[in-house]
Every structure is written in structure tokens, then in C-alpha cells.
Image (spheres, grey):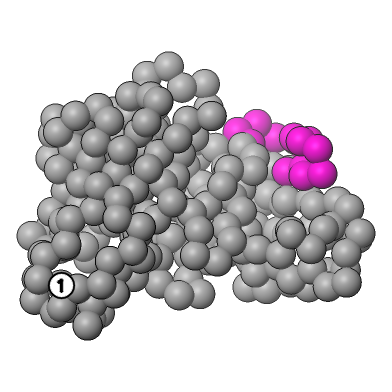
């Protein structure tokens, strides 16, 4: 099946620094990638939808200047958490969708990145 | 608005059958997914329903009724490793955006 990787898997940073998370589709081209955030004991909350070569579409309440998304190629999207604060500590998960050509409207998830801001 | 409801937690016995329900109200509908998620890991795909009826895949089956905005995931012959969170998600348009329910934490006891 389709494989999506994320790097790093775990990161600890100081408050005020920026952190970049990479999401790669390894064996397929992903025209659309999604970024989610998940707090403990809660479900996945969509942050933004990223289409290759265009600006990301952010969900209501997500600050686009704080969470910078770049989808420069069909296999790579990056999420940069700028000026991170302890409340940004969370599990960040990306997913990728292979379209056109996908039979099922399925998203393939990366393994997630655990961000801890001290 | 968009709303997806599922029970917060369920407990079942090893070897038994458990049904996890999901009701949804979304502005559009382009399919319903069930995912399994173990703590600290990413969700893994279990099933997809876009037409009414039952989809069976080994020990897992999923049912959809679009007119009722209702789905369930049926797990048979429960194993200890089935202890996980089960997420119901609806794709509400052609863009592939998924709206997730809060997840059902299933505990399988010996």
C-alpha cells in the first residue's frame, strides 16, 4: 500500500523557536496533503489542506502565519510551527491523497510527529 | 454544521463481537471511513462505505445508511490487540477533506 513518512518523529524545543515537520509520500504522487493536530484523548482536528503548487487552505481558527505550510512538490509537504509555545505541544499527523486516479477517496497517514515545547 | 458522534469508550470480552456506532450530520457526503488508532501512532485504514449496505473484510465489517446518517463498525472474534481507538470519519466533498468523530476507545478484556 501507499506509504507516507514524517520527519522528525519526535521533537522537543524551547518556547519561541520554530520547528519544521516534513511529510513525504514515498511511492506515489500526492497532489493533496492534509495536516492534522491531535491532543491527548482527542480526535484528529484538520488544520489545513495543502495542494501542490498552491497556497494551503486553513481551517477556521488555525493561524496561517503561525503554521506555515509549503507543498513544493508532489511528494513533499512541510509544516513549520513558528514561535512555538507550550500550548502548541501536540501530535501532528499528515496524510496524503493520490488523485486523480484514486478509486477510493482514501487518505494515507504518516506516523505522526510528537512536538513538545518547553 | 458538521457533527459526528460516536461513543467515547466501550469494553468487550476477548472472542466476543462488538458494534461501534457512528451518526453524522454533514453538509455533504462523499464516503465514510473507519480507522483504527493505537496510542501514539497514526490511524490505519479499516473500511470505506459510500453506498448503503454492509462491507465485510475479514473480522471487520462496516455498515452504512445514508438516509439515517448512520454507520457501524462490527468487530468479530475480538482479540486483545484490537484494544485501540476507532475513528469514524466522513468525507464531505470531492476535495477529500475528512471530518473525524471523537473516537471510541475500545478495551478488550480477557
Q: Quadrant of residue B37?
A: bottom right
Q: Residue at x 61, y 53 (%)?
A: B36
Q: Which residue is mark 1?
A: A84
- In the rendered view, does B2 fall on the left or right side of A25? right
Q: Is residue B78 visible?
A: yes
How many neighbours does mark 1 have within 10 angstroms: few (below 14), some (14-19), or many (20 or more)?
Answer: many
Percent across and percent down for residue A24 are 31, 38
- Dominant secondary structure of the residues highlighted in magenta in the image: strand
- In the rendered view, does B56 fall on the left or right side of A38? right
Q: Residue at x 74, y 71 (%)?
A: B107
Q: Quadrant of residue A90?
A: bottom left
Q: Nearer the viewer, residue B16 or B21?
A: B16
Residue B19 counted in the magenta span: no
Residue B50 counted in the magenta span: yes
Please give the range of residues in magenta: B49-62
Percent across and percent down for residue A39 are 40, 72
Amino acid at each position: 500500500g501507499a506509504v507516507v513518512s514524517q520527519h522528525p518523529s519526535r521533537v522537543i524545543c524551547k518556547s519561541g523557536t520554530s520547528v519544521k515537520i516534513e511529510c513525504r509520500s514515498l511511492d506515489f504522487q500526492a497532489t493533496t496533503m492534509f495536516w492534522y493536530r491531535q491532543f491527548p484523548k482527542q480526535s484528529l482536528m484538520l488544520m489545513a489542506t495543502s495542494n501542490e503548487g498552491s497556497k494551503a487552505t486553513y481551517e477556521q481558527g488555525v493561524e496561517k502565519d503561525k503554521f506555515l505550510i509549503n507543498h513544493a512538490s508532489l511528494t513533499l509537504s512541510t509544516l513549520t510551527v513558528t514561535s512555538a509555545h507550550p500550548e502548541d505541544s501536540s501530535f501532528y499527523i499528515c496524510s496524503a491523497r493520490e488523485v486523480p486516479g484514486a478509486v477510493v477517496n482514501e487518505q494515507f497517514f504518516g506516523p505522526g510527529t510528537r512536538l513538545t515545547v518547553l | 454544521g458538521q457533527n459526528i458522534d460516536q461513543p467515547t469508550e466501550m469494553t468487550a470480552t476477548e472472542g466476543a463481537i462488538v458494534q461501534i456506532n457512528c451518526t453524522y450530520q454533514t453538509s455533504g457526503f462523499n464516503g465514510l471511513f473507519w480507522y483504527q488508532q493505537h496510542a501514539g501512532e497514526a490511524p490505519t485504514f479499516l473500511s470505506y462505505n459510500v453506498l448503503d449496505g454492509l462491507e465485510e473484510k475479514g473480522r471487520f465489517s462496516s455498515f452504512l445508511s445514508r438516509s439515517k446518517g448512520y454507520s457501524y463498525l462490527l468487530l468479530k472474534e475480538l482479540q486483545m490487540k484490537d484494544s485501540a481507538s476507532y475513528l469514524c470519519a466522513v468525507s464531505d466533498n470531492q476535495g477529500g477533506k475528512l471530518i473525524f468523530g471523537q473516537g471510541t476507545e475500545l478495551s478488550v478484556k480477557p
